Structures are given as C-alpha cells and as structure tokens.
Amino acid sequence: MSKHRICSASVASVYPHYVAKAEKKGRTRAEVDEIIRWLTGHSQPSLDDQLANGVSFEDFFAQAPRMNPARSLIKGVVCGVRVEDVEEPTMREIRYLDKLIDELARGKAMAKILRE
C-alpha cells in the first residue's frame, strides 16, 4: 500500500491550519506548540527549526527526540477514522496530532489533552 500524500507534506504547510483552528476557538499558538512538544519530545527551538526547514511529516515523526509513550491513550475519531485503528505508523502519528488539536479547539483542558 502506498503512503498517503500527507506523509510527504511539510509540517510547516499544515501548522498554520492547526494554529488557525485553535485561535478561532480562543486558544493560542503556544498551546498548539505545547501539544506538539508533548507528542514529539521536541524543545521549542528544535520545533521551530523543523518548521523552518520544511521537514515532511514522515521525517518529523521519525526524527522526533522522544515520542511520548502516553500517546497510545489518545482515542477517538478524526475524519471518520478511529485513530487507534490506523495501522500505518506515520499516518497514526498524524492522526494523534490531529485529535489533540481537535480537543484543544473544543475547549478541553490542557491537562486532559496531555493525558495528565
């Protein structure tokens, strides 16, 4: 099975959409960054570098310093697909991130989003 085209898209091309979705619901760019850092283990400078360098989603997740083991607790549906049922690893990570941003936009508390 071939990979979905989003896997080769740059994170920087989608990032403004994550921020816009959050800000439209009264949340902040800082909260979006916190979610991404929690998921991937990036520091803010390394996240900024990844965005500036136009890294693809596939490389972004493959090169993440430390994928959070608690991400397996992320459950639910994004775009009609249950995130926990996605088999392709990169696509699953993308769906995890999408789900976290959805939860942020829906007003969920950061402690709950970050599975604390």
Image (cartoon, rainbow, N blue to C red):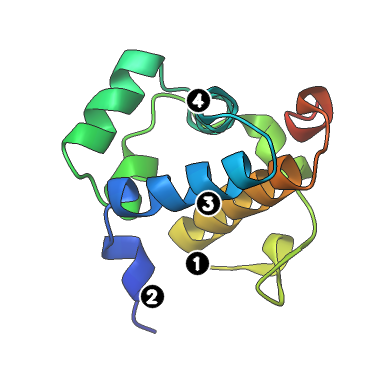
Mark pair 1, 4: CA separation: 22 Å
Mark pair 3, 4: CA separation: 13 Å
Q: Kindly report which numbered mark, 3 or 4, lies closer to the viewer in this rendering.
A: 4
**Who comes first in sequence, dot 1 or dot 4?**
4
Q: Quadrant of the C terminus?
A: top right
Q: Report crowding for label 4: few under 14, some 14 to 19, many 20 or more residues within 10 A (C-alpha).
A: many
Give the amino acid type for the residue marked by disc 3 in the picture.
Glu
Query: Residue 105 vs residue 60: left or right?
Result: right
Q: Kindly report which numbered mark, 1 or 4, lies closer to the viewer in this rendering.
A: 4
Q: Residue at x 57, y 47 (%)?
A: 97
Residue corresponding to mark 4: 37
Could you say which disc has been placed on residue 93 in the image?
3
Helix, strand or loop for disc 1: loop
* Residue 42 on image: x %, y %: 41, 22
Q: Residue at x 16, y 37 (%)?
A: 53
User: In which image quadrant can residue 62 be found?
Assistant: top left
**Front-most of 5 and 86?**
5
User: In which image quadrant can residue 112 be found?
Assistant: top right
Q: Report crowding for label 2: few under 14, some 14 to 19, many 20 or more residues within 10 A (C-alpha).
A: few
Residue positioned most to the left: 53
Residue positioned most to the bottom: 1
**Who comes first in sequence, dot 4 or dot 2?**
2
**Who comes first in sequence, dot 3 or dot 4?**
4
**Who comes first in sequence, dot 1 or dot 2?**
2
Q: Report crowding for label 1: few under 14, some 14 to 19, many 20 or more residues within 10 A (C-alpha).
A: few
Query: Residue 86 vs residue 43: left or right?
Result: right
